[in-house]
Image (spheres, rainbow, N blue to C red):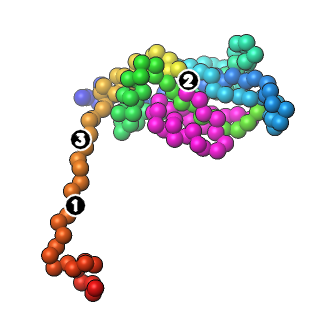
Amino acid sequence: MTADEMDDIAPTRMVGVVVGRRKATSEWASDPFVVTPHAVLSQAPALASGAPLGQVGALDLIYLGSAELALWSGETGHYRDNLATGAPRLWVALTGRGERVAVHLVTANPYEGESLADSPGLTLEAVAMPPDIAADLAVFVARRHVEEVFVKRKRDKARGDAGPRGPGRRA
């Protein structure tokens, strides 16, 4: 594979993150609004962070801002697993609460997304992957994936002169 072929699909791209904001329904809620990831746009639009995009039922859609979606050649097996589901996802993690929400991470790696589920202070949601990102991801995997053969380790044979605690040690 030539360097030109490798550069056809950039390993990073800027995406736009859309969040849904609704009023908190619990009387014990410390914040008046609940903000969750709603969608990822395949390109970051020329909108200001916080720009309203409309409503879906009781959910206000807001453009939160742009984020970097980075692809790593060592994770192509994980991306392949994501694409194999038939409904590939992007995991969006947000930090902050209420009106002070920011994008922490956008990833196509399902295992990285799963690992963030227990992170305190993060709001995590798996959202649908836009078709053009899925197509680019499939090309990235096809060009850069290297199957790693599993090699089982074998124990070293015990030395006859080693005794019960190893060579040079007294029992």
The residue where tag 3 is placed is: 149
Looking at numbered disc 1 in the image, what kind of residue is underneath it?
Arg
Residue 91 vs residue 63, the one in the foreground: 91
The alpha-carbon separation of the residues under discs 3 and 1 comes to 19 Å
Q: Residues within 10 Å of mark 2 (few under 14, many from 20)?
A: some
Q: Position of residue 133 (x, y in %)?
A: 46, 20
N-terminal label among 3 and 1: 3
N-terminal label among 3 and 2: 2
Q: Residue sitting at 24 percent across and 84 percent down?
A: 168
Q: Is the residue 157 above or below the residue 29 in the image? A: below
Magenta stretch holds residue 158: no
Q: Position of residue 157 (x, y in %)?
A: 17, 66
Instruction: Determine the secondary structure under disc 3.
Output: loop
Over which residues does the magenta segment extend?
99-126
Residue 7 seen in this snapshot: no
The alpha-carbon separation of the residues under discs 1 and 2 comes to 45 Å
Q: Residues within 10 Å of mark 1 (few under 14, many from 20)?
A: few
Q: Residue sitting at 30 percent across and 32 percent down?
A: 145
Q: Is the residue 131 above or below the residue 19 in the image? A: above
Looking at numbered disc 3 in the image, what kind of residue is underneath it?
Val
Of circles 1 and 2, which is in front? 1
Number of the label disc, if any, that sits on residue 155:
1
The alpha-carbon separation of the residues under discs 3 and 2 comes to 32 Å
Q: Quadrant of residue 31?
A: top right
Q: Position of residue 139 (x, y in %)?
A: 35, 22
